[in-house]
Image (cartoon, coloured by chain):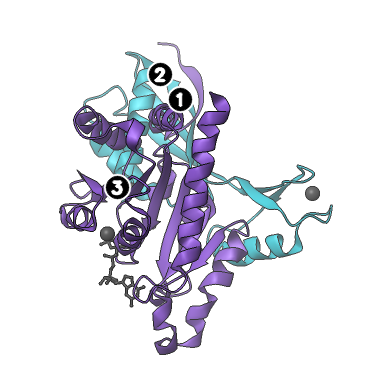
């Protein structure tokens, strides 16, 4: 049989990207601001979401999609904080993909999520800095959460994640007095490979720096809402 | 060991393009910044492709260097970083120097992710 070469020239994530584009259009239509939170295990994603819910609801209606390898512990925390938590178990999988988000929303959309009443969706990705940033979920913003205790070398070990993100939260600032000086290099290290990163230094434990974060969140929600009004 | 989803989508895409013909080679372009281990990707591919038209396909990996683009004048610059060296010092110095037009606004436009370039079928 004759050999033939086929030009493909397509990203390996093409199938995921087209699902992500589809759900992004849906979020856009309803003016819902969507945030994808990525971090290594235990950096404080769920803590930051809890704080955000406490500060902004009930004025702002927040739905949280919780990616977790096996448990529902994080979505239980979200429900306890007073927002709607939707659980996605990846059964050991190391990241969320767009199809999982679509399924989670469609299974629940009829009964539970009324898109018209949601202002913001926060997606807590699986705790892992290696690959979640590669898989588009239809979000508006991608935020990496790091904590001061993780070591300041993370931006260099996971450059793709820090380059794809637009926002960086440096959490656990309350621990600064107890850590050796190099821990403070996290911020310059991150900026050296992605100078465009918007950076928040904060502590979910003592509340320092959180008000700037809330303002940024509220500004984005407003912008997204005005966006649909502008289009309409 | 997170290459399985990549291997699965490479397989799905390749089979779709090949129809019922058998695939002998898949050329992949892997960004210098992508967190992909070719050996591990290959291992998953071998497992997943058993019994499909791609089971005899060999995977060829081509590394795509990192390219920076200036947001002001749109000039691009390719950075050659040896495979066994950390990327940070190279990248940091380029960001520090900025573009020859004086702008400091550079973005990474190439060298992330992984792409299927071509398939050979028979
Ligand atoms: N000292 C200190 N501890 C914090 C802070 N924020 C969170 N923690 C603690 O860090 C631990 C992990 O926090 P989580 O919010 O569960 O982190 P996570 O990123 O959601 O973790 P996974 O979902 O398991 O990846 C908990 O014990 C928190 O109490 C902080 O600002 N300072
Ligand atoms: Mg969590
Ligand atoms: Zn993964
Ligand atoms: Zn320039």
Name the residue beneath numbered marker 2: B17
> Which residue in the rendered view is the most extreme toward the right?
B101
| Image mark 1: chain | B
Q: Residue at x 37, y 47 (%)?
A: A60
In the image: residue B77, left or right of residue B62: right
- Judge left or right: residue A179 versus residue A109: right
Q: Name the residue at 28% across, 32% down.
A: A114
In this rendered view, identify the residue nearer to me: A96 or A102: A102
- What residue would you read off at disc 1? B119
How many marks are shown on the rendered structure?
3
The residue labelled by disc 3 is A64
**Mark 3 C-beta to ligand 2 under 8 Å:** no
Q: Which chain is cyan?
A: B
Q: Do the residues marked 2 and 3 share a common chain?
A: no
Circle 3 chain? A
| Label 1 or label 2, whichever comes before in sequence order | 2
> In the picture, which chain is purple?
A
Front of the two marks 3 and 1: 3
């Amino acid at each position: 049989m004759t050999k033939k070469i086929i030009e493909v020239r397509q990203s390996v994530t093409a199938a995921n990207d087209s699902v992500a584009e589809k759900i992004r259009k849906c979020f856009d239509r309803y003016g819902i601001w969507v945030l994808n939170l990525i971090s290594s295990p235990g950096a404080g994603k769920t803590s930051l979401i809890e704080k955000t819910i406490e500060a902004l609801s009930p004025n702002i209606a927040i739905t949280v999609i919780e990616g977790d390898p096996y448990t529902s512990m994080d979505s239980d925390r979200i429900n306890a904080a007073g927002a709607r938590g939707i659980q996605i178990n990846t059964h050991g999988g190391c990241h969320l993909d767009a199809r999982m988000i679509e399924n989670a929303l469609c299974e629940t959309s009829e009964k539970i999520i009324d898109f018209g009443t949601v202002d913001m969706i926060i997606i807590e990705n699986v705790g892992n800095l290696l690959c979640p940033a590669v898989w588009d979920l239809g979000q508006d913003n991608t935020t990496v959460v790091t904590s001061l205790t993780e070591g300041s070398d993370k931006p260099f070990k996971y450059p793709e994640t820090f380059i794809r993100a637009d926002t960086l939260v440096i959490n656990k600032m309350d621990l600064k007095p107890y850590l050796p000086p190099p821990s403070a290099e996290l911020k310059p290290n991150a900026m050296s490979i992605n100078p465009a990163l918007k950076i928040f230094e904060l502590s979910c434990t003592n509340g320092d720096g959180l008000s700037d974060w809330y303002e940024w969140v509220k500004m984005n929600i407003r912008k997204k809402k005005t966006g649909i009004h502008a289009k309409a | 060991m997170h290459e399985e989803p990549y291997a699965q989508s490479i397989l799905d895409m390749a089979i779709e393009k090949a129809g019922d013909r058998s695939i002998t080679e898949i050329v992949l372009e892997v960004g210098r910044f992508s967190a992909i281990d070719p050996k591990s990707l290959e291992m998953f591919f071998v497992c997943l492709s058993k019994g499909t038209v791609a089971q005899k396909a060999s995977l060829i990996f081509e590394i795509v260097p990192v390219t920076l683009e200036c947001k002001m004048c749109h000039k691009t610059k390719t950075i050659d970083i040896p495979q066994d060296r950390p990327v940070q010092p190279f990248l940091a110095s380029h960001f520090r120097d900025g573009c020859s037009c004086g702008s400091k606004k550079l973005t990474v436009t190439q060298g992330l992710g992984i792409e299927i370039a071509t398939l050979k079928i028979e």
